[in-house]
Amino acid sequence: MIYGTGVDLVSIVRMEGVIRRWGDRFLGRIFRPEEIRVCGARPLPHQAFALRFGAKEAFSKALGLGMRKGLRWRDIEVFNNPAGKPGLRLHGRAAEICRDRGIDGVHLSLSDDGEYGVAMVVLEVMERGEDSIPERGGKRC
C-alpha cells in the first residue's frame, strides 16, 4: 500500500551556482562522502548533485515532514545499483521514522532535461490484510 509520494523539480544551473559559491561546505552538509565521490567523478557533476538533492527533497515530501522532525540531509543517501538504477539508503532519523511508520518499500526515479531535473519517491507500507484498511466515509478505500 502506498504510504506517500514526493516529487521535486530542481534547477541544475542553480545547483551549479550554489556549489561554486559554497563548495565543500555545502557538499559536506548535504551529501555523504560516497555521494560526493560518485558525483564528482561524473562528466556533469552539478547535474548529478542536483538530482540527488531533488531525491532527498522528494523523500522528505513523501514522508510528509519536509526537512523537520530531526530529519537531516545526510540521513538520506542516493546510490545506484550495479545496473545504474537509483535508490535510497536511509540512515539515522530517516531510517528510524520509516521503521516506526512501517515503511518497507522506497522507490526512486530520477530524470533530467537541459537545465532541470526531477526526482520522484514512492514510499510503501506492507499490506496488513483487508481488515486493516482504514474506512473513510463508510467505504473501503
Image (cartoon, rainbow, N blue to C red):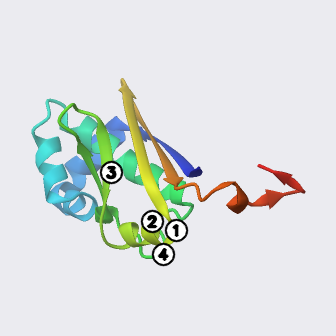
Q: How far apart are marks 3 and 1 (CA)?
A: 17 Å
- Residue 49 image offset from top left, x and y in percent: 26, 44
Residue 101: mark in rendering: 1
User: Measured along the vertical axis of the image, is residue 40 above or below residue 23?
Assistant: above
Apparent side of residue 76 relative to residue 119 in the rendered image (left or right): left
Apparent side of residue 108 relative to residue 17 in the rendered image (left or right): right
Apparent side of residue 88 relative to residue 45 in the rendered image (left or right): right
- Residue 85 image offset from top left, x and y in percent: 28, 35
Q: Which of marks 1 and 4 is in front?
A: 1
Q: Distance between the residues labelled 1 and 4?
A: 14 Å
User: Measured along the vertical axis of the image, is residue 69 above or below residue 119?
Assistant: below
Q: Looking at the image, which residue is at 33% across and 62% down?
A: 73
Mark 4 touches mark 2? (CB < 8 Å):
no
Residue corresponding to mark 2: 98
Residue corresponding to mark 3: 88
Mark 1 touches mark 4? (CB < 8 Å):
no
Mark 3 touches mark 2? (CB < 8 Å):
no
Q: In which quarter of the image is residue 24?
A: bottom left
Comparing 120 with 122, the one in front is 122
Looking at the rendered structure, the kind of residue marked 1 is: Arg
Q: How far apart are marks 3 and 4 (CA)?
A: 19 Å
